[in-house]
Amino acid sequence: QLEGFAPSSMHITNNPTLALFSTGRTTGIVLESGCGVSYSTPIFDGYALPHATLRVDLAGKDLTNNMINILNTSDHGHSFTTFYDHTIVRDIKEKLGYVALDFDQELRASSSSPGSFYELPDGQMIIINNERFQCTEPLFRPSLLDNRSGGGLHDAIYCSIMKCDEDIRPDLFRNIVLSGGSTLFPGFSARLHKEISSLVPATTKMKIISPPHRKYAGWIGASMLASLPTFHANLWVSRQEYEDNGPS
């Protein structure tokens, strides 16, 4: 990158670490879920732990595709099939989607709910009801999607923590940080807390941190890191150093 873009200086780090820094923490576990993939990354004293980092191939685009399938099998009088329709459904998901605390109970309650209106670009109004929380449920039950197996995001967090040294597990459970656009759904934090609580002893102290600007947590953390005096003194590589010493 120093050769291609010719910046004056450069520092490389991973996004989950920056997301954690954005909350003022150096130890915790970051659940990052964006468009294409989700990661559970434990971080101790500012260093990510690769051996305990888990990847889940489930994120925003899968939820959008799930919403398309649900809408196309519902009686809305509109079929979503084109690329432009994909953009519309993504907007529906982002504006109306939420996570149910209890899926089965929410499904029963939705039968008597009027739902929410959404205006399509051509002016047609459609009603979105239980699709609002059905589309996000695979985050916790991937088996609802075709050809998917394995646990949900809560399982990834639990397994990541259990792969870490026993001494730091309490700190990780007390500092679960959310990052990425697919963690922004209303009800996500509460459902995540409920699901993880079902996997651990009742005495386990747990806290989920949901920064309001977590969609941009990596950028915020990077700006905070770059503003530290020690960063300029010790952490970045200048172009002059690179030219003197080479890529090795």
Image (cartoon, rainbow, N blue to C red):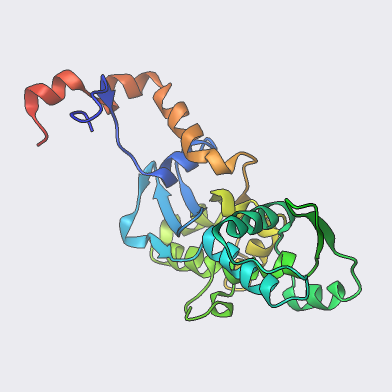
Q: Does 40 sit left or right of 132 as displayed?
A: left
Image quarter (top left, top right, bottom left or bottom right) of the C terminus: top left
Q: Nearer the viewer, residue 124 or 21?
A: 124
Q: Nearer the viewer, residue 220 or 114?
A: 114
Q: Determine the image quadrant of residue 18.
A: top left
Q: Is residue 83 above or below residue 217?
A: below
Residue 93, how many percent across, how many down? 67, 58
The picture places residue 39, in percent across and down from the top left corner, at 44, 58
**Spot occupied by residue 124 in the image (x, y as percentages of width and height):** 80, 57
Q: In the rendered image, which quarter is residue 108 located in?
A: bottom right
Q: From the viewer's side, name the closer residue of 29 and 236.
A: 236
In the displayed structure image, the side of residue 239 where residue 32 appears, left or right? right
Q: Is residue 23 visible?
A: yes
Asked whether residue 197 is in view, the answer is no
The residue sitting at 21% across, 30% down in the picture is 4
Question: What residue is drawn where x is 74% and y is 76%?
Answer: 74
Total number of numbered discs in the rendering: 0
Tell me if 85 is positioned left or right of 172 in this view. right
Q: Residue at x 56, y 43 (%)?
A: 215
Q: For the point 35% across and 45% down, which residue is it?
A: 47
Residue 160 drawn above or below residue 25: below
For residue 197, side relative to residue 155 (left or right): right
Which of 127 and 156 lies nearest the eye of the viewer?
A: 127
Instruction: Estimate the x, y position of residue 52 in percent, counting from the top left.
Output: 36, 61
Quadrant including the N terminus? top left
